[in-house]
Amino acid sequence: MITAKGKEAMLTKTRETADKIEAHFDTIENEIFNGDAFLKWRGSFDMKKVIIKKEGADVKIDYDIRLLNWPDGLSIKVYKHKALGVFAYLKDEEECQKYLNEKPVACRYWRESFYFSHRENLDSERYVLLEGNEMQDNDTHQCLEKIKCHLEEITNILSKCQ
């Protein structure tokens, strides 16, 4: 049986972990909007953020990042649920196939979303860290690198369709 003191210690640790992860996601957001690596896209970003914090539960964070000139439903998702990951997706299967010129791969765990990429092994490729609560600075940098790679790939794919 867990004592009241033990339960409070667990809640405190959960809150501290959530705060740490939120700080890493704040860094990601700041770099996207202000960092030199994303300078060529500055002023073109739109970001939707969802943060779910429940007492005694791990924080869940979703950032959906897109450029304003992209087709509707096309975004890069950076998330921390159980795992930490990054992937590009489009909500419309027909549109996805039109741009990719191949049958799109459904995103595992994201209903009615399709990977927007020509890469292989997309279900495993998206992971940065399987245990997202262990997120460290190097994982934040890896997320930023993946975001930049997806931005460049999407820009390339869309430019071939114009």
Image (cartoon, rainbow, N blue to C red):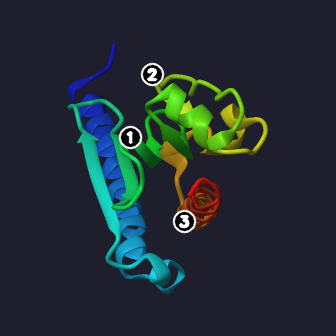
Q: Nearer the viewer, residue 27 or 161?
A: 161
Which residue appears at 61% of the width and 65% of the height?
152
Disc 2 residue type (three-letter): Glu
Disc 1 residue type (three-letter): Gly
State the separation of the CA atoms marked 3 and 1. Answer: 21 Å
Which residue appears at 46% of the width and 84% of the height?
39
Instruction: Decide if residue 73 is on the left or right side of residue 19.
Output: right
Q: Nearer the viewer, residue 150 or 59?
A: 150
Q: For mark 1, what is the residue?
A: 73
User: On screen, 21 above or below 113?
Assistant: below
Could you say where residue 158 lies in the image, as x and y percent from the top left? 57, 56
Which residue appears at 32% of the width and 77% of the height?
43
Asked if residue 115 shows in the view, the reply is no
Describe the element under mark 3 as helix, strand or loop.
helix
Q: For mark 2, what is the residue?
A: 112
Q: Nearer the viewer, residue 74 or 139?
A: 74
Q: For mark 3, what is the residue?
A: 144
